[in-house]
Image (tube, rainbow, N blue to C red):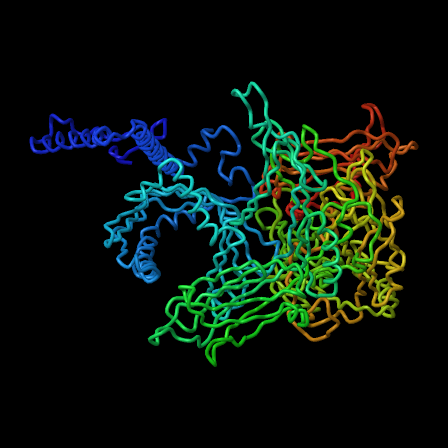
Amino acid sequence: MPTTDAEPDMNGGTTAADPASPNQLPPGERAVSVLWSFGKCLAALLPVYLAGYYGFSISIVLLGLMIYMGWKHTRLEKAMRIKSAMYLLENEREFTTERVFRTKRDLPSWVNFPDVEKAEWLNKILQQAWPFIGQYLEKLLVETIAPAIRISNAHLQTLSFTKINIGDKALKVVGVKAHTEQDKKQVMLDLYLSYAGDVEVNVEIKKYFCKAGVKGIQLHGKLRVILEPLIGDVPLVGAITMFFIRRPKLDINWTGLTNLLDIPGLNAMSDTMIMDAIASHLVLPNRLTVPLVADLHIAQLRSPLPRGVVRIHLLEAEDLTAKDTVIKGLIDGKSDPYAVLRVGTQVFTSHHVDNNLNPQWREMYEWFNLKDVPSGSVHLRLEWLSLLPSADRLSEVIQKNQNLTSKTGDPPSAAILAIYLDQAYELPMRKGNKDPSPMVQISIQDTTKESKTCYGTNHPVWEDAFTFFIQDPRKQDIDIQVKDDDRALSLGSLAIPVNRILNNPELTMDQWFQLENSGLASRIYLKIVLRVLWLSDDATPTTPSSRPSSSGSGLSQGGITSEMNPLGSGGLGKPQPGRPQQTTPDTEFATEGVLRIHLVEAQNLIAKDNFMGGMVKGKSDPYVKIRVGGITFRSHTIKENLNPIWNELYEVILTQLPGQEIQFDLFDKDIDQDDFLGSLNISECLIQWYNLNDVKSGRVHLVLEWLPRVSDLQRLEQVLLYQSQQSYQNKAVPSAGVLFVYVERAHGLTLKKNGKEPKVGAEIILKGISYKTKVCERSTSPRWDEAFHFLVREPRDEILTVKLSHSWGQALGSLTLPLKEVLAEPDLVLDRWLNLDGALPESQILLRATLKILDTQQAVCHKVPAGAGSDATDEEVIPKWDPSHLDLRRRSAFPIDNGSMAGQVKLTIGYSTEESRLFITVHSCRGLGACSKDGADPYVSFILLPDKKATTKRKTATKKRDLNPEFNERFDFDFSLEESSQRKLDLSVKNSVSFMSRERELIGKLQLDLDQIDLKAGVTQWYNLVAGTN
C-alpha cells in the first residue's frame, strides 16, 4: 500500500500525510485562507448579533448551538464508523486470527457456524467486476430511475444525478450457507453481506437550487436468495427471489441538503423511514423476484401462500421495572406498560395499563424473560394455524371464534385470503386520449391495500400480491377499484363476494374479470386463493406451563429463542373428533426400490504378486469394492487366485431419480498397499460378463436385478421359496419385501415426573436395525412427520417396535407391531392410531406401515423399470441413487479374511455440527463367545486410524460375566467433518484377564471406514464382529 494512503488509527479515525504549513503557501493562497477564517468567525458570531439586535432570548442561541454540536458529533461518529468498517473488511483475516474480537459473537459467520462457508472466490469476482457494476448502476440511475422520478411528480421535473461513483470498495460476502433439504425444486442460499463503501451519489433539483447526496454507506445483513423453480432448460433456474430475513444494519453519510438528516432527533426518524422503505421491498415477508424465463407467476413467487399462520396472544407481564420514580429514584413509583410487536414492516401496539408493574392482558400460557432490564417476564400464547384448502370446517372455525369474542373483543380471523393481481387489458384513456397511469385499491371491510403504479399505459402489468385476514368469508366482499395515479379518476371497479370462492375447487379463482364502470373490453386478471385457518384441538393445552427458573429453561437470557412446534405445545386433553384419522405423508413416501447385486466370479485377472523383479510369476489375492450412491460394499479376499469365485449378494434401497452408475473396483490385497486389478462402471441391469477397464486382461461376472415391488400377497410364498433355495458365500439372505414406516404424531402422552411436558423422540426398530426421529420440543402431542424403510426377510415372523422416550431417557410408551398384521391389511397398508403400551390409556401414536413384496421371479431384467413405486414392466434407465434416501443401516463391515462370526456390537456414529465434533456411542454387545466356563468379562476398546500416537484410543468399562453387556458410553473427538470422514474405526471387544491367565483375551474385531457413513445424519446399528486370535 502506498505510504500516502490514510490508515485507521487506534480510535477508528484516520491519519494522513501532514499538509504543508501555512508559512509555506504562496501569498495569494495565504490571503484567501485568512479571509476564509475571518468569514467563518463572522458567520459564527452573526446569530449572536442578530439575537441581540432583535431582542431574542439567549436560550435560542444556545439551542441552535446545541443542535449544531449534536449534528457535528453525529457526522463525525458516522464517518468514523464507516471508515472503521472499511478497514475491518479489508483486514478480516488479520483481525480474526489475532483475536482482536474478544467475544465469539464478534467473529465472522464462517467462524461461528461450521455450516457457513467462506466465499473468497465470489468476493474476488465482485471486486474485479465492481467498476462494471458501477457503470451499470450509473446507466440505470440516469436512463431509467431519473426519468421515472421526473414523471412521478411535477416538482421533481428538473431532478438529475450530477455524480455517480460507487467507489473502489466492493460488496463482500462474508459467508454462504446452502439449504437444499427443504424442497427439491429449489435451492436456498443465505448470504451474509457486509458492505462499507466509499460510494458517492449527488442529486440536484435545479428548479429549487437544491443539492443532496450520499458519501459513504455501511450495510450488514443476511440476505436469503432462493433459486426456484429449477427447470430442465437453460438457464436451469426460473427466477431469483431475494429478501432479508430481518432488517439489515444501515448507516448512511449524507451530504448537501440531506446533511440536516443528521441533526439529533431527525437522524433516528430518517433512519427509521429509510429502513421502512427498504423493508417494504426487501425484508420478509416482502420479496424481490427477478424472473429469468417467460411465463412465470411472479406474484406467487414474490408472495407465496404461507404454510400456516402464527396467532400471538399478549397475556400478561410480571415484575416489570418501575420507571415513574420520584426525587431521582428515592421514592419508587410504577410504570404504565404497553407492548410493541414488529413483524417485517408491520407494527402492533397494545393498549397501556396505568400504574401497574404486573399488568394483566389475557389468559395464561407460557413465560418468556425480558432482556436488557434487571427483571421482568411476559406471558405469551403462540398458536400455529394450519391452512385448509376446503370449506368443510369453516362453520366449526367461525363458531369457535365467536365463543372467544367475549374474551378478546373482536373475534379472531377464520380464513386468510391471498389476491394475486396480475394485469389489466384495455383500460379507458384519460382526457385528451392520453394513456393513464393505473393503480389498484383492494378493500375488504376496513382494510385497504394499494398496488404499485404503472405509468403511461392502458395495459398495465402489476404482478402484485396481497393478503387479508377474513373473520367470516360468508358475509364479506372484495372491493377492487382501478384508478389513475392521482386517485381521482376511476378507470373501473369490481365487487366479488368472498362466498363465491367457497364453491370453487381448492377455494381458488384464477380468471379474467370484466370491470364495471369502465370500457366495454376492460378486464382485469386475478388469482384469488382462500384458506381456512384451523387450530387443531390436540394442540390446545389444558394447563398452563410454569414460569422459567432464574437459570433459564432452554431459553437464552432475555430472548425468545425456542422454535415453535407447528402444532403448538400439546396437552392432556382427550382425543377429539377433529383429530386426523390417517397420516398425510409426502408424495415421495414409499417410492424407493431395491437393487440386488450378485457378485459371482472373475477370470483372467492380472498377477500382481511377482517375485525376483517379475522373473517368477505369482498370483493375486483379489477382492472387490462396490460403490452405489454413497455406500461401499467390500467382498472377502480370495487367496492366490486369478479366477476367483465370490458368490456374494448385496442389496440397497434406492430412489427413482435417474442418473448415476454402479462402480466396481478390483484390488489385490497386499501387506502395504493394495494393487489395482481393474474397474467397471455399469448403468444397466444385465446378467453377463463385463470386461475390466484400465488393465490388460480380466473380466467379472455380475447379476444385477432391479426388483419390482408388488402388493400381491400370493406372490409372497413364491418369493420365500426362491429365497430358501439361494445360498451365498457372505451368508446373505435375499429380502422378501421392503417395509416403509411413516411416523406422523402421538397424542396424550404422560408428563415427566416433575410435572413438565416431555421432549419426545421415537425409536423405530426391526431385526436389530434402528432409526431415531428428531426430538420434539416440550409437548404431550408431538409431531415428527418422518419416514423410514427396512429390508424384510420373513414378513410373517418379524416384529416392528416403536419406543417413545423423553430425550432418549424416561420411557413414555412403546408399540409392538407384528408384520403379519400388516399382511392382513388391504393392499398391505396399515394406517391408523395405535395404542401405546406402558403409557396412559389415551396415549396413542399415528403411523403408516406399508409393505411391498419384492417379486424376485420377475427381477431378472435387461433394463431397470422406470418407477420404483410402480408395477410396470416397461424397460427404462436405471434410477439414480440418492444417499439421503438409502438404507444406511443395511451396510455391514466385511472382514479381510473369511473368519467366523463372534457376536455383534451396537454403535451410534455421527457428527455434531453444532459442537463441531465426532461422537461414537458404544451401546451394547450381544451373542459374544464365552472365553471360560464363567463366560467372559467383556469391554470395548477402539482407535481411530491413522493415529501414530494413539491419542484417539478409548475403552469402556468392564462388565463382569456378561455375554450381552450394556455399556451406553459416549466418546467425543474434536475433529472437523472432513477429517472425521477420513478416519477408520478399528474396534475390538476383549475379555478382561489377568497377566498370568490362559483365557482368550480377544473376542471379536470390527474395522469400519467412516467415509461409508452419513455422519451428519448419524447412524445407529448392529455390526458383526469377526473372530480373531490373540
Q: Residue furthest front?
A: 55
Give coordinates of residue 611: x percent, y percent.
Answer: 61, 47
Q: Is residue 694 above or below residue 1018?
A: below
Q: Quadrant of residue 626?
A: bottom right
Name the side, left or right, on which 67 lies relative to 585: left
Q: Say which quadrant the N terminus sits in.
A: top left
**Which residue: 35% across, 50% down?**
128
* Residue 477 x, y percent position in the rendering: 60, 66
Say above or below: 584 vs 256: below
Q: In the image, what residue occupies the spot 84% across and 26% down?
A: 997
The reply to whether residue 229 is in sight is no
Q: Is residue 1024 above or below residue 14?
A: below
Residue 612 in view here? yes
User: Camera-side residue: 874 or 745?
Assistant: 745
Residue lying furthest right in this view? 933
Q: What is the tally of numbered marks visible in this picture?
A: 0
Q: Quadrant of residue 45?
A: top left
Residue extending farthest to the top is 330
When the figure is inspected, residue 993 is found, relative to residue 684, above or below; the finding is above
- State the image coordinates of residue 160 (x, y, percent, origin top left): 27, 55
Comparing 889 with 587, the one in front is: 587
x then y, percent, for residue 579: 79, 56
Query: What quarter of the picture does the C terminus occupy?
Result: top right
Q: Nearer the viewer, residue 872 or 528?
A: 528
Q: Residue furthest left?
A: 27
Using the rendered view, name the quadrant where residue 265 is placed: top left
Q: Nearer the viewer, residue 271 or 915?
A: 271
Horizontal side of 950 relative to 13 (left or right) equals right
